Amino acid sequence: MQNHMKKIAFFGGSFDPIHFGHLNLAIQMKERFELDQVLFSPTPCSPFKLDSPPGASLEHRSKMIKKAINEIDSFLLCEIESKFEKISYTIDALLELKQINLDAQIFLILSNEAFKGFNKWKESDKILEIATILVGSRDNYLPDGELLGKIPKENFVKMPILDISATEIRERLKKDLYCGHLVNHKVLEYIELHKLYQS
Ligand code: ATP
């Protein structure tokens, strides 16, 4: 029996592909907030990226996540968003997650980049009611105005954010450049096997 409320963190993104920047953010949040589970949730397609849908299918991206997190205790693939088909909103995934984990405290992991657009997210106020937001940034970032009153300052965490983006990785793969310093080698093997990101 656990003597504390289970802490479950939701970490959503395209993960196209998952890289060390994602893992570093998630590991730092897990350790700092003593999270029991971190759920990696690949989005079918982000409402903010409709013009540039993911390069790899949801199935491929999910499998790559599994390979990347396999050895990391308490990191799991979350498949809630897979049934949302096309566009997926974080609020809908969080509502479902809460529904199946009524006794848990739900967290939402974001980078400061992602958090900067948070005001424009569907039902952002409701997200704040359901989930405790955790934001990682490389500087001492704090939002201004209203949001600051709604999220504890300690939840804005200064950390060494790795300068890695999936866009850069896809470009390097296209040029057949080495990516072992950016992506788990098992994920790279998967990419090679399935000939992903070649064009
Ligand atoms: P793309 O380059 O395709 O836009 P991305 O690398 O930014 O992708 P996403 O899958 O869109 O990755 O990101 C998922 C989440 O991880 C978002 O909150 C995003 O801001 C965050 N994130 C992305 N890259 C990093 C990084 N290097 N360090 C910390 N967080 C990151």
Image (cartoon, rainbow, N blue to C red):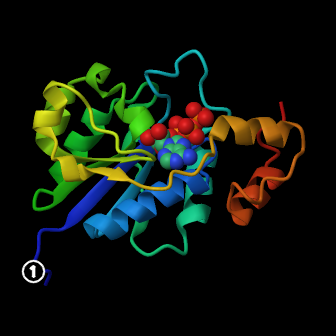
User: 92 and 188: which one is in front?
Assistant: 188
Residue 120 shown left or right of residue 4 in the figure: right
Callout 1 crowding tier (Cα within 10 Å): few <14, some 14–19, many ≥20 = few
Callout 1: CB less than 8 Å from ligand 1 = no
Give, as a three-letter code, the residue at label 1.
Asn
Q: Is residue 94 visible?
A: yes
Residue 186 shown left or right of residue 3 in the figure: right
In the displayed image of the protein, which residue is found farthest to the front? Answer: 140
Residue wearing tag 1:
3
Secondary structure at badge 1 equals loop
Residue 108 shown left or right of residue 184 in the figure: left
Q: Position of residue 195 (x, y in %)?
A: 82, 45
Residue 118 shown left or right of residue 196 in the figure: left
Q: Position of residue 127 (x, y in %)?
A: 19, 36
In the displayed image of the protein, which residue is found farthest to the bottom? Answer: 1
In the displayed image of the protein, which residue is found farthest to the right? Answer: 176
The residue under the point 16% across, 42% down is 151
The residue under the point 56% across, 56% down is 65
Q: Position of residue 16 (x, y in %)?
A: 62, 41
Hey, which quadrant is residue 137 in on the image?
A: top left
Q: Is residue 98 above or below residue 73?
A: above
Q: Is residue 195 above or below residue 54?
A: below
